[in-house]
Amino acid sequence: MVFVKDCTVKFMFQTLKLVLPALIPSWRFFDTIAPSPRIEFSLIKNKKTPVRNWKIFRPRPVTISFFNMMTRMVWNPRWNDNLFLVSCAERLMQKPTEHSYQEILNRIQADIKESDGFSFVQFRLIFTHREEEILKESETFLSDIHEIHKGEYL
Amino acid sequence: MSFDLAIRLTEILLAWAFIQQSAEHIRGSKVDRIIFIPRLILSVVLMVGVQTQWVCLLLCVVGLFILKRFQGPYNGGSDRMSHLILWCVSLSYFMPTQEWKEYIFGYLAVQLILSYLIAGWVKIINPEWRNGRALQDVFQFSTYPVSENLRGLAHWPRLLFFMSWAVMIFELCFPFSLLTQTTLMIGLCVATLFHLANACLFGFNRFFWIWLAAYPSIIWLQDRLF
């Protein structure tokens, strides 16, 4: 009975923690321009002696036509998913959780179309920030090496 | 605008925003489909206007699953506004008196005003926003510009300085638009253009639709107060 009560209280507390920021929002949009995350991944052949060739995960297009901009008003799933991945990357730095880690890894796995003899995958986070007039990049997170599950989105 | 009409318009616009959001998730993972297909169906029912109070309540429950699924909002502010509108409309149905219904719906209108006012305030107290540097950083290295070509705007400091001040002045002046119905309509038109620009430049399409859904509340509040 005590266990059930504890679980209920825990559930209520967790629910409130998720709902309250929506009901009493802060609305502090773009108050400061924080260091900006970029996700990179590398396919790896040998886990013991990994050779890495980092690629940007889902690079943005060079240009977007006006027509595409308009269609994206109603259909923009890829970009919105990328925005969620930015949140996951920021969460990994502020308060690391398995959830954020898996959300990034799952999407990388799902986007691998051809593995070309590679058996493993790894990702890293690069944060860009400005110091005076110079842009600086730093690797702030390196994942474990995982087996490739091509095209699998759990 | 009458209270009932404002609530109904909010429901229709909210339903459209939810249909748009949910459709984007359907090609996602299996878990996403389990959550978002029912949400899509409920949103269609909400738009049609059948048993809206119970549909809203069910959408609140689905909303909890979404928050749990993504361990918080999926798309930051747009998700927060989505939950806020839905909870305010739902709660207003279950309030015992008309006065309390209006307090709840009025709270939504106040939050809409705050969404512009606070966003403007946190910018204007930051010197980097006042000199245009912050917006330059947004285009130069943030993750938001939708194409690489847009990063070129970072090389237009004067334009960005003007844009920064235009955004801050609009956001801070928005509450004054409540003074008359005409100024409010002008304010809402400018706000719509602002969200359209954000959608085009930064891909914030969900913000555009969900903020529109909150506009009937402020039109009703202005009518009620002045």
Image (tube, helix red, strand yellow):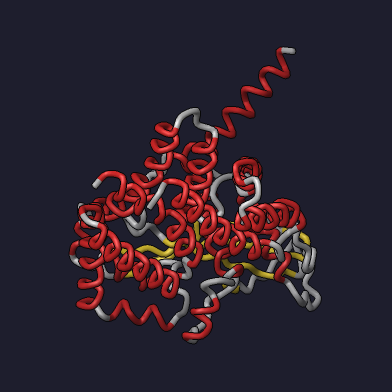
Q: Position of residue B38 (x, y in %)?
A: 72, 52
Give the quadrant of residue A151: bottom right
Is residue B179 shown to the viewer in this render? yes
Q: Residue at x 76, y 67 (%)?
A: A46
Residue B224 falls left or right of residue A147: left
Q: Is residue A98 visible?
A: no
- Quarter where residue A41 is shown: bottom right
Residue at the (42%, 42%) spot, across then down: B105
- Farthest residue, direction top: A1
Of residue B28 and residue B9, the one placed in the foreground of this image is B9
Which residue: 50% across, 43% down? B89
Q: Residue at x 31, y 45 (%)?
A: B224
In terms of depth relative to the viewer, which is nearer, B16 or B207?
B16
- Can you give x and y, in whole percent of width and height, for residue A28 in the image? 35, 50
Residue placed most toward the observer, A67 or B131 = A67
Query: Left or right of B68: which side holds B116?
Result: left
A3 relative to B57, above or below: above
Residue A34 pos. (x, y %): 37, 57
> Could you tell me residue B14's position as x and y percent?
53, 55
Q: Is residue B191 above or below residue A95?
A: below
